[in-house]
Image (tube, grey):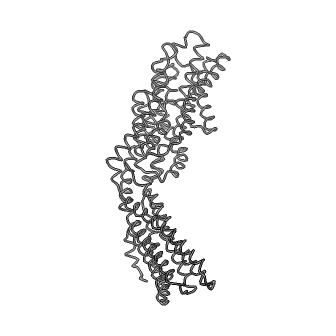
Amino acid sequence: MAEEFTSFLIIVLIIMGVALAFSIGANDETLAPLVGTGVIKFKTALILGGFAVGFGMVFFSEGVGKTVGANILGPGIKYTTFMLLAVLISSILWLIIGSLAGIPLSSTHSTIGSIFGVVIVFSLFTGGIEPSTAFNWEKLGNVVLSWFISPLFGLLMTFILFKIIAKLYLIKLKGMNQIEKSEKSFTRLLFIAVFFAEIWVGANSAECIGIFYGLYDNGSINQGEYYFFVFICGIFVFLGIYIAGRFVIKNLASQITDARPSEGFIIQISSSIILMICTLMALPISHSHVIVFCILGLNVAQKKEIDFKAMSKMAAYWVLTFPIAAIFAGFIYFGFISFGFF
Amino acid sequence: MNELDEKVLKKLNIDKLTHMFMDEINEQNLKLIEGIECLLEENFDGFEKNLKYVIKSTTEIQIKKAFESKIFKSKLMFSKADRLKLFSKINDMKNIGEFLANKMLLYKVIFPDEKFKLQVLSIIKSIKELLNNISEAVKSIGSDLSKSHDICEKIKEVRRKMRKEEWILLNRLWNYDMDYLSRTFLYLKELIEGIMLLADHIKNFAEYIQFLATKYLIFD
């Protein structure tokens, strides 16, 4: 009976993990600048973008998945099915609350925060493991550090890239015709940058792949099944963009028809390079945080006015996501433990 | 009024059509000014001929149609809306000119004295300068936005000077010792205000061009 229940829970987790992959695709707005410029047809952009995210998720996500699903934990501790369930419930609920309150939150920060809360509760109430040894603190420290460093690098990279391109090329453009022609060329570069970014967005989707790696690491699924589910996630992230993501993309694209492709290119290439480096270093980071700082970097380079009030509000939410998700997940898992579900 | 060849118009690009439209409207507005100069000289035939030219001219409609069909199909990415707005701002110059011409034709007036005439001539000279400058600024947008920006700065300066001249003229008009026929007074008042309406539009247009320059140009 208990075994049947555990199997049932594993199936629930797999469905939730796959649904998470779908929602990653559904909320991906990376294609918006490309659609806004009208460089390719909308449906073609969705298919190519969806394929790129799926490709990134299937082929490059293992390192990040391993970090979330196993490596941030200390020696001798593995996720139980209920721990993973508490992590998923907490991060999903916290993201829903954030969306309803209009607060932009990072699903990566929320997932890692939830893991932190769950593992602390596990070590405190189930015995056998000290909270001090429950984590691979070096790895966890690197992950948290990367959340601060990656947006700052995004800002810096966009700033420098814009200054170089402006100094060597953009500043020399004098008339509207010349500028229009140049921006037309930038749309081709933007096309490449967006698909490059999509690959690394898929590859850095830690919250989804981490769950499957956790299941593989605790022996709930074997290696073949793990790769199979990663592949299924790749398909669902594609479907997420194609079926549901189109609304977000269309909406955003209609608002940015005035945006310059050259600026879009600088932002996308900077953010995707940061994402690529972090993915290759197996560090799960927030794509949206990096993008926001890249936009900020561009504004600083162009000496545009910055809304510091809005920025500090956003920063406060970002900092609070981790502890709140941790407390939230901790309570949920504590509830499971109270009923004897470890 | 010269009819334009539709085939030739179809071959022209958006930039050339905008320039052609600007030239056409500029020519019509200069005719309007020429008409007012005739009125100052009490050459009523010349006055009527010039103002009727402005009213009856339809060449710009042909250019406008060619432009609209071209821009609708064009693959311009982010300057499309700005080019449309630019075109409509030029068109507004025609509308103001036509409105003024129709109004001026309702009555004919003899100016009160030489000093008043000289001051009207001074305002006319300034409006001519504005018209020629805005035409040059529009034509430079495609090739050199900095140049357009600088020309627009000059336009704003001239318009500031005109505002002072306008108050001097109106002050003179309101404080004449003799009592004028109310029609004469109203006509002269509306003539001055009409010219200033065109000047104000050109100034707003110049500010829009400066906005375009700051939007498109990347500064060090």
Residue at 43%, 83% (x, y): give it: B1
Q: In the rendered image of this protein, does residue A6 appear above or below residue B34?
A: above
Q: Nearer the viewer, residue A10 or A106?
A: A106
Q: Is residue B178 visible?
A: yes
Q: Nearer the viewer, residue A270 or A251?
A: A270
Q: Is residue B72 visible?
A: no
Q: In the rendered image of this protein, does residue B117 appear above or below residue A156?
A: below
Q: Is the C terminus of chain A in the top left, top right, bottom left or bottom right quadrant? A: top right
Q: Nearer the viewer, residue B185 or B27?
A: B185
Give the side of residue A233 with respect to residue A266, left or right. right
Residue at 55%, 36% (x, y): give it: A314
Q: Is the N terminus of chain A in the top left, top right, bottom left or bottom right quadrant? A: top right
Residue B120 position in % (x across, y down): 49, 78
Give the side of residue A334 with respect to residue A56, left or right. right
Q: Quadrant of residue A313?
A: top right
Residue B207 position in % (x across, y down): 48, 61
Residue farthest right in this picture: A339
Residue farthest top in this picture: A128
Residue A117 position in % (x across, y down): 58, 21
Residue B146 position in % (x across, y down): 38, 58
Give the side of residue A183 with respect to residue A325, left or right. left
Q: Nearer the viewer, residue A176 or B103?
A: B103
Residue farthest front in this picture: B177
Q: How many marks?
A: 0
Residue at 45%, 44% (x, y): give it: A299
